[in-house]
Image (cartoon, rainbow, N blue to C red):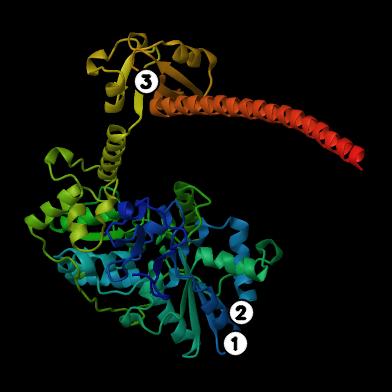
């Protein structure tokens, strides 16, 4: 997992990833694997819904950028280059920008610009035909690639209910290549990240040459220096049929298929958002005959590839207004396009069975083996401690992800430091009443927890703490001899202002003080003795000098006498 595949649709930017577990929490299928504190996307489990991309606060979750491929296709100039624009584009652009969008795309090199709604109408028509042919059973519309991938991987027994019809993107790409020739290339623009994966499904191979999100489209315009206000108004090269411009909204498919779109219709149910999609699939036999599921809340207008410059409901209103004010062409005769598809149900691997004993062992390692310690807080991203333990056993999570457990461990370590500290530690409330102390303090001041609630004056002079409280200082440092207890302490006193408390740390320097006094005495004695020795030496020198002077005088007198005698004799 160290290096994710370069062609992976959804991946993690390791430089940005932090230990927040937000992606684990929001991922509907728990396709996020924690490794060394970083969250990686497991491609085999990912349904490319893009929820983690939208929700990651650090923008560490990204989708594959295919702008380089699109630029290469535009530069080839070999045959037609067609742009298929998802109908949700109207929720991104203002009315005047929509009128200029085709011109800007043609400036990039596109020779044919059309709305994907053209293919949406064909999908809706095929869906209506299947419903007419088989009205007695439940059906799940298959336009949303995320729903299809979710069913294939996590609800494979529901695959048989999927409408065997391609999505509007594939339907439109087929239409474009039949219309423009085999050498033509098709680039799809839309709000959906999963479309990148859908275009690469084996059954869809060769129809869509590149998929760009609307975010990538805007980046392409910026890269080429294109500004929409500089272009003339122009039209798309093809007009969609019927009500297909309603397609990106929940209920848009059934509206396009001319089915009953009444909110209270019993036979049709339009759902959006993972919770609604999952619940409708789990209770398929009890819901409507036709279920139209869109994985993003309120439909494609909330896709992760569309900039959220407008509110969701404003985007919805824009689509409704545009589709109403710009009705599609009248439907033409039946045209067979070969819109069938075969789905591939394959339940994801990795969900190996785990035993109760294994779960118990992981819970013990997390420090929440007891039922009262299993808070099920969801901080790790999983709904329960048990679910997280199972994920640990399956290699998707780490024991250290349990935040309450890590906090308890930190508190235990903190308590251990306090309990074993050689320094006395005292805690007072705002009235200087004793509310806490560690064993070293109790030993120094010969007290027990029975003094809790008493003022500090019960044990010592309260003046330093009173001075601290009155002065507003952040730290008071002083050395005090507590003669009653035969100790000398270097004291550090400071306030906990947010809690209205005061802390005192007492460092025992009694031995150090005694050693200093002993050293001072030794120094004094040495100096005294040195002075006595010096005085003695001076006296001796003076005495010697006196004796030498007297001796010298006597010697001089003796020599003179000898000289005088010698002179007389001569």
Query: Mark 3 packing: few (<14 Cα in 10 Å), some, or many (20+)?
Result: some
Measure how far apart labels 2 and 1 are at the Cα level.
Answer: 8 Å
The residue that disc 1 covers is 77
| Residue at the farthest front position | 569
The residue that disc 2 covers is 109
From the top left corner, tell me how far across and down residue 335 is, in percent: 36, 80
How many labels, in total? 3
Q: With respect to residue 418, does 336 lie above or below?
A: below
The first of marks 3 and 2 along the sequence is: 2
Residue appearing at x 32%, y 65% in the figure = 146
Q: With respect to residue 33, does 539 lie above or below?
A: above
Which element type, helix, strand or loop, lies under badge 2?
Answer: loop
Q: Which mark is residue 487?
A: 3
Q: Which mark is residue 106?
A: none
Q: Do residues under tags 2 and 1 come within 8 Å of each other at their CB atoms?
A: yes
Q: Quadrant of residue 11?
A: bottom left
Which quadrant is the C terminus positioned in? top right
From the top left corner, tell me how far across and down residue 509 is, in percent: 41, 27
């Amino acid at each position: 997992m160290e290096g994710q595949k370069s062609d992976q649709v959804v991946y993690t930017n390791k430089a940005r990833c932090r230990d927040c577990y937000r992606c684990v929490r929001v991922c509907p299928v728990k396709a996020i694997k924690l490794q060394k504190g970083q969250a990686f996307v497991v491609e085999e489990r990912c349904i490319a819904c893009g929820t983690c991309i939208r929700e990651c606060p650090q923008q560490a979750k990204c989708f594959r950028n295919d702008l380089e491929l699109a630029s290469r296709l535009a530069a080839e100039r070999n045959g037609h280059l067609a742009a298929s624009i998802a109908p949700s584009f109207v929720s991104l652009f203002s009315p005047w920008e929509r009128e200029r969008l085709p011109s800007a795309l043609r400036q990039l090199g596109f020779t044919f610009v059309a709305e994907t709604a053209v293919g949406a109408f064909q999908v809706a028509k095929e869906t209506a035909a299947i419903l007419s042919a088989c009205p007695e059973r439940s059906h799940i519309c298959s336009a949303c690639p995320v729903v299809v991938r979710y069913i294939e991987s996590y609800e494979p027994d529901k695959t048989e209910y999927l409408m065997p019809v391609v999505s509007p993107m594939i339907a439109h790409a087929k239409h474009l290549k039949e219309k423009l020739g085999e050498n033509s290339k098709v680039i799809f623009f839309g709000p959906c990240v999963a479309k990148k994966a859908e275009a690469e499904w084996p059954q869809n191979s060769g129809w869509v040459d590149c998929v760009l999100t609307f975010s990538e489209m805007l980046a392409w315009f910026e890269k080429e220096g294109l500004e929409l206000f500089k272009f003339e108004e122009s039209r798309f090269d093809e007009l969609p049929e019927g009500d297909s411009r309603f397609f990106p909204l929940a209920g848009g498919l059934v509206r396009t298929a001319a089915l009953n779109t009444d909110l209270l219709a019993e036979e049709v149910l339009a759902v959006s958002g993972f919770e609604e999609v999952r619940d409708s699939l789990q209770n398929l036999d009890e819901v409507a005959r036709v279920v139209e599921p869109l994985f993003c809340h309120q439909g494609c207008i909330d896709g992760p590839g569309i900039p959220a410059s407008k509110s969701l409901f404003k985007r919805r209103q824009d689509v409704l207004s545009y589709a109403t004010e710009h009705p599609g062409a009248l439907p033409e005769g039946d045209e067979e396009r070969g819109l069938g598809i075969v789905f591939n149900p394959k339940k994801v691997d990795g969900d190996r069975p785990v035993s109760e004993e294994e779960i118990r062992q992981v819970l013990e390692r997390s420090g929440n083996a007891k039922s009262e310690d299993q808070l099920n807080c969801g901080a790790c991203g999983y709904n329960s401690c048990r679910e997280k333990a199972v994920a640990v056993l399956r290699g998707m999570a780490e024991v250290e992800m349990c935040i309450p457990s890590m906090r308890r461990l930190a508190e235990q370590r903190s308590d251990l430091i306090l309990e074993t500290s050689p320094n006395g530690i005292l805690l007072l409330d705002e009235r200087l009443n004793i509310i806490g102390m560690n064993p070293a303090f109790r030993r120094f001041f010969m007290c027990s927890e029975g003094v809790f609630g008493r003022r500090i004056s019960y044990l010592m002079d309260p003046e330093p703490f009173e001075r601290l409280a009155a002065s507003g200082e952040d730290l008071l440092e002083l050395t005090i001899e507590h003669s009653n207890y035969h100790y000398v302490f270097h004291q550090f006193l400071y306030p906990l202002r947010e809690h209205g408390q005061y802390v005192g740390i007492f460092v025992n320097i009694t031995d150090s003080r005694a050693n200093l006094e002993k050293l001072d005495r030794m120094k004094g004695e040495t100096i005294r003795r040195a002075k006595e020795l010096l005085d003695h030496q001076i006296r001796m020198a003076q005495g010697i000098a006196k004796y030498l002077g007297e001796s010298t005088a006597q010697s001089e007198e003796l020599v003179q006498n000898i000289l005088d005698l010698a002179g007389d004799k001569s």
